[in-house]
Image (spheres, rainbow, N blue to C red):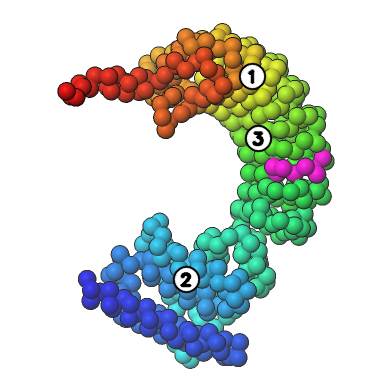
Amino acid sequence: MSRTVSSLCYSFLFISSPFLHFYCSFHRSENRPFVPLISSIIKNQAFWHIATSCKGYSKVLEFVVLSLFLVWHHCYFVCKSKGKVYLALMEMVGKEGLRTGVLNLSFGKLMMVGGGENSGKGVNLKAGVITDWKDIPVELLMQILSLVDDQTVIIASEVCRGWREAICFGLTRLSLSWCSKNMNNLVLSLTPKVTKLQTLILRQDKPQLEDNAVASIANFCHDLQILDLSKSFKLTDRSLYAIALGCWHLTKLNISGCSAFSDSALAYLASLCRELKVLNLCGCVKAASDTALQAIGRYCNQLQSLNLGWCENVSDVGVTSLAYGCPDLRTLDLCGCVLITDDSVIALATRCPHLRSLGLYYCQNITDRAMYSLAQSKVKNRMWGSVKGGNDEDGLRTLNISQCTALTPSAVQAVCDSSPALHTCSGRHSLIMSGCLSLTSVHCACAVQAHRGISTIPNTAH
């Protein structure tokens, strides 16, 4: 084993050390002397012997291969991005997820034919000729860039035209939440280039984004599936209308804190973005009205998660429409929706059999009637699930009834007993009852068993 490690280290140094010399003379060399050097390294029998026999060191070999590409194609990228890509490649050595197949793919891309006589003419590959930075395989470039932060990816797009085109073609996820200023201009400049985006995160600590940037997103990013615009206080209804017209394939939208949106604009978006599965409207007081929820229930039948936290205009009318129109609803946060009553919870219990998380914090109109309805529906669902081979863990997994002071212990205990995944025991609190002093006697099954176990331990003290 030690001999193998030694030979591997020797091979690593053999491959890497010449690049230190050519790294410094990169820009002074017109005939690219590193081309025959790489060709000779790749054709070295010892190198391939280690590559094929030492599978346990595939991470190191993967690092070597990607480093060859990186140094070969442009030291400028490493310098300008302050070595982030190089450090990311070093982190790759310690990653557990690398497989031999990835290694073989990288080696395949480096299989060079010909020798020093090809210097200055490019090096022939199975897939074509490498003569410039732009000829690096797109999938390998994207693999390198997947290891660095989004800011570095943007820097990389300025290295050369080839890299910019590759990034624009291959980039599917981008987060600009790190941008503390000029986010609006950055979005305006990037969106015409990154048209293949599927995920775009624009979360802000202070409002920067404006309607023209969102319009640009809608005009160019038609494949977008996930969009986060949380805390975009400057946005108006124009943004929602633009998203509705340009991003029809959205499955996840976060507009929490966007207090300027109206319910008519949200209803219009719901009528066109019918593939929505996750929607966060927390704090959207004007937008989240019964009218908007009726539109969501009518058009967004695939909805699975909805956050209506502190949307104080929501009433039983809106929640009931949701329950009837979105039968696959699994997570619903109604915290602070002070107008809702037992009718909302009863509709959810009877019409949404997959409901797993329900937030009712500060919904002080909720009474025992709602709790018994939840308990009965979960018992029925579990009985039907056992007939069909369902999971014993079906039922509520999270329930927040904090500050619901009208509830009694017997009703809440019924819910807890009907949903085995609800816990009151230490470390597993999923039944949250803060501020309900009358419910201190409610306990989950495992907490009761633990208490009984302690009480049956004989007292050995004399």
Residue 42 relative to residue 129: left or right: left
Query: Could you say which quadrant of the image residue 303 lies in?
Result: top right
| Whole-percent x, y for residue 21 in the image | 49, 88
Local crowd size for mark 1, using a 10 Å CA cut-off: few (<14), some (14–19), many (≥20) = many
Whether residues under marks 1 and 2 lie with C-beta atoms below 8 angstroms apart, the answer is no
Q: Which residue is mark 2?
A: 66
- Pick whichever of labels 1 and 2 is earlier in the sequence: 2
Please report whichever mark, 2 or 3, sits nearer to the chain's N-terminal start.
2
Amino acid at the residue labelled 1: Cys
Magenta stretch contains residue 129:
no
Gap between marks 1 and 3 measured at Cα: 19 Å
Q: Residue 430 vs residue 462: left or right?
A: right
Q: Main secondary structure of the magenta part?
A: loop
Residue 11 in picture, x, y percent from top left: 34, 80
Residue type for callout 2: Leu
Please state which of residues 251 and 87 is positioned toward the viewer in this rendering: 87
Circle on res. 363: 1
Q: Quadrant of the C terminus?
A: top left
Q: From the viewer's perspective, is the residue at label 1 or at label 3 nearer? A: 1
The image position of residue 352, as x and y in percent, is 55, 20
Label 2's element? helix
- Badge 2 local density, few (<14 within 10 Å), some, or many (20+)? many
The residue type indicated by label 3 comes to: Asn
Sequence-wise, which precedes: disc 1 or disc 3? 3
